[in-house]
Image (cartoon, rainbow, N blue to C red):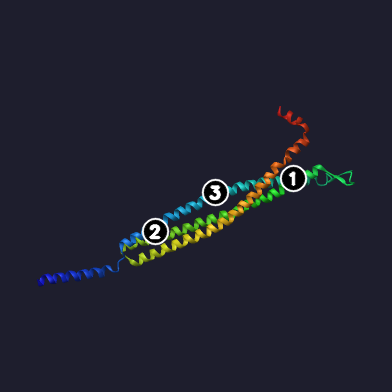
Amino acid sequence: MSEAMEAMEHAEHASHAGHGHDAGKAPAKLIGLTMALIGVLIAFCAAMVGGERNELTRSMIEQTQANSDATSASIKYRLIMLNMEQMRGTTPAAETKPTAEGSAEANPKVVRILKLYKDYAQERKLSKDWSDSYSPLVDAHFESAEGYEHAQLIAEIGIVLASLGVLLGSRPAWYISLVFAVVCVVQLGRVYIHTRHEVEEVSVHVKHCEEAYSELRKEHSKSNADDLTVEALDPGGKLRAEAAE
């Protein structure tokens, strides 16, 4: 009986000693859960980086189209300026023949050139404003992608530290991995809030510039000024008909 009591006492002491020995070790299950959560953070960061890069590519493609329209408008403007330079000093701005009101009759050629100058100058300005409006949007998506990449890097460091906590049974390594996980979440939230606010604000400006340019182009298309010019040079379309044969 006494021997049995002594064996139980030894087992109890061994159990307490075992608990005391494991007290400094990190719980493997909690570290595994931490690694799983950090893994989810890494996957989420990668998805956000991919999304921002797609938005960056789309914005750059749209900016290229706007640049093409701005270049076209600038070429038309420069052609009109060249015509005006050639006309300066050779074509009078008004005919010498007086009108019924006693004023000189305006030269139709000069009037037409000045009208084109006004239209193309406005078109060049609006198209340039539209093209330039994309620069802040491109910068916002680029910076956002970098911010999410930094968050992903932080999470990857955290999961490495958690792995060391499992291998070494180290609580400090586990605690530091938790800190990195929290920092990753904070970084994600900061980048998301900043990017969302900036992109929404810039997108409104881009849309406004695009609508202004599109409205001007519609007005030019409805005016039929080019058709009237061709008709003035070829009344009745006789020359055009001969050229088509």
Q: Give the tally of numbered discs.
A: 3
| Amino acid beneath label 3 | Arg
Q: Which residue in the protein does label 3 denote? A: 58
Q: Position of residue 5 (x, y in %)?
A: 13, 71
Residue 139 is drawn in which quadrant?
bottom right
Tell me the crowding category of disc 2: few under 14, some 14 to 19, or many 20 or more residues within 10 angstroms, Cα based.
many
> In the rendering, which numbered label is found on residue 54?
none
Cα–Cα gap, marks 1 and 3: 34 Å
Q: Secondary structure at mark 3?
A: helix
Q: As rendered, which of 76 and 4 lies closer to the eye?
A: 4
Tell me the crowding category of disc 3: few under 14, some 14 to 19, or many 20 or more residues within 10 angstroms, Cα based.
few
* Lower sequence index among marks 1 and 3: 3
> In the rendering, which numbered label is found on residue 38?
2
The reply to whether dot 1 and dot 3 touch (C-beta < 8 Å) is: no
Residue 112 higher or lower than 18, as above or below? above
* Lower sequence index among marks 3 and 2: 2
The reply to whether dot 3 and dot 2 touch (C-beta < 8 Å) is: no
Q: Which residue in the protein does label 1 denote? A: 116
Q: Secondary structure at mark 1?
A: helix
| Amino acid beneath label 2 | Ile
Cα–Cα gap, marks 3 and 2: 30 Å
Cα–Cα gap, marks 2 and 1: 63 Å
| Amino acid beneath label 1 | Leu
Q: Position of residue 4 (x, y in %)?
A: 11, 69
Q: Position of residue 79 (x, y in %)?
A: 72, 44
